[in-house]
Image (cartoon, helix red, strand yellow):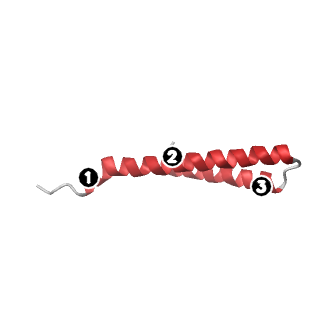
Amino acid sequence: METKEAAKTIQRLLSITETGLAFSRDEFDRERYLELRQLLGHLWLIGQIWMEKNWQSCCAQRIFMPLP
């Protein structure tokens, strides 16, 4: 899955959790949606860290390589 696709998927799932929180029927539903939102936030953070490390190890070297 590409980075943009992953970001869109996480964003869509976060939207679903927001709707679930707004229309939850009881405290148990609310707890599940809150936990899911927290897990998605964690996945988002992991993705951001991975992108930063990936950029530094791959793209930065290509951009700043001296020309022959």
| Residue 38 on image: x %, y % | 65, 48
Residue drawn at (31%, 47%) of the image:
58
Q: Are marks 3 and 2 in contact (CB under 8 Å)?
A: no
**Residue at mark 3 to residue at mark 2: CA–CA distance:** 24 Å
Q: Which mark is residue 46?
A: 2
Left or right, 58 with reference to 15: left
Left or right, 60 with reference to 34: left
Callout 3: SS: helix
Left or right, 9 with reference to 4: right
What residue is shown with label 1? 62
Residue nearest the viewer, comparing 37 with 58: 37
Residue nearest the viewer, comparing 24 with 31: 31
| Residue 46 on image: x %, y % | 51, 46
**Residue at mark 3 to residue at mark 1: CA–CA distance:** 43 Å
Label 1 or label 2, whichever lies nearer to me, is: 2
What residue is shown with label 3? 19
Q: Residues within 10 Å of mark 1 (few under 14, many from 20)?
A: few
Q: Residues within 10 Å of mark 2 (few under 14, many from 20)?
A: few
Residue drawn at (51%, 52%) of the image:
4
Q: Amino acid at mark 1?
A: Arg
Q: Amino acid at mark 2?
A: Ile
Q: Residues within 10 Å of mark 3 (few under 14, many from 20)?
A: few
Residue drawn at (58%, 47%) of the image:
42
Residue 39's quadrant in the figure? top right
| Residue 1 on image: x %, y % | 51, 42
